[in-house]
Image (cartoon, rainbow, N blue to C red):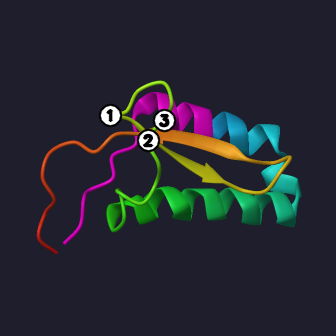
Amino acid sequence: MAYPVSITSRAERDLTQLYEDINAPYSDAARRWYEGLKQSILSLEEHPHLCAATPENRRLRNLLYGHKPHVYRVIYTRVGKKEKS
C-alpha cells in the first residue's frame, strides 16, 4: 500500500530555487545530492510514518536529508488514507 506524495507549488518553487542555489547544473556532486533529496521525498509514499514529528506541531513531520553542514529539512503531513498499489 502506498500514500500518494503531492508536492505543493510552493515546495516546487523551493526545490527549483535550491537546485539553482547549490549550482546543481554545474556540479555532479550537487546534482547527486539534489536527486537524492528528491528520492527521499518520493520515498515518503511507502514510509510516511518513519520521520519524527516536528517540535513546532506534532501533526507535522520532518524529513532531514544530508549531512552537516548540508542538511535540508522537509516538513510534511499525512493526509487521507493510503491507496492500494
Residue closest to the eye, 29 or 56:
56
Q: Quadrant of residue 29?
A: bottom right
Quarter the N terminus occupies = bottom left
Query: What residue is drawn where x is 37% and y is 33%?
Result: 58
Question: Label 2 near label 1: C-beta < 8 Å?
Answer: yes
Which residue is label 3 attached to? 54
Residue closest to the eye, 12 or 79:
79
Sequence-first disc among 1 and 2: 2
Which residue is label 2 attached to? 53
Count of numbered badges drawn on the protein: 3
Going by the numbered disc 1, the residue's amino acid type is: Arg
Question: Label 2 near label 3: C-beta < 8 Å?
Answer: yes
Secondary structure at numbered mark 1 = loop
Is residue 45 a member of the stretch shown in magenta?
no
Image coords of residue 15 (percent x, y): 60, 41
Going by the numbered disc 2, the residue's amino acid type is: Ala
Which residue is label 1 attached to? 59
How far apart marks 1 and 2 lie (CA) works out to: 7 Å
Image coords of residue 70 (percent x, y): 81, 48
Magenta residue span: 1-15
Is residue 7 a member of the stretch shown in magenta?
yes
Secondary structure at numbered mark 2 = loop
How far apart marks 1 and 3 lie (CA) works out to: 8 Å
Query: What residue is drawn where x is 23% and y is 67%?
Result: 2
Q: What is the residue that sits farthest to the top in this orientation?
A: 56
Sequence-first disc among 1 and 3: 3
Give the answer, above or below, for where 67 lies relative to 70: below
Query: What residue is drawn where x is 88% and y is 59%?
Result: 27
Going by the numbered disc 3, the residue's amino acid type is: Thr
How far apart marks 3 and 2 lie (CA) works out to: 4 Å
Give the answer, above or below, for where 26 lies relative to 53: below
Q: Quadrant of residue 73?
A: top right
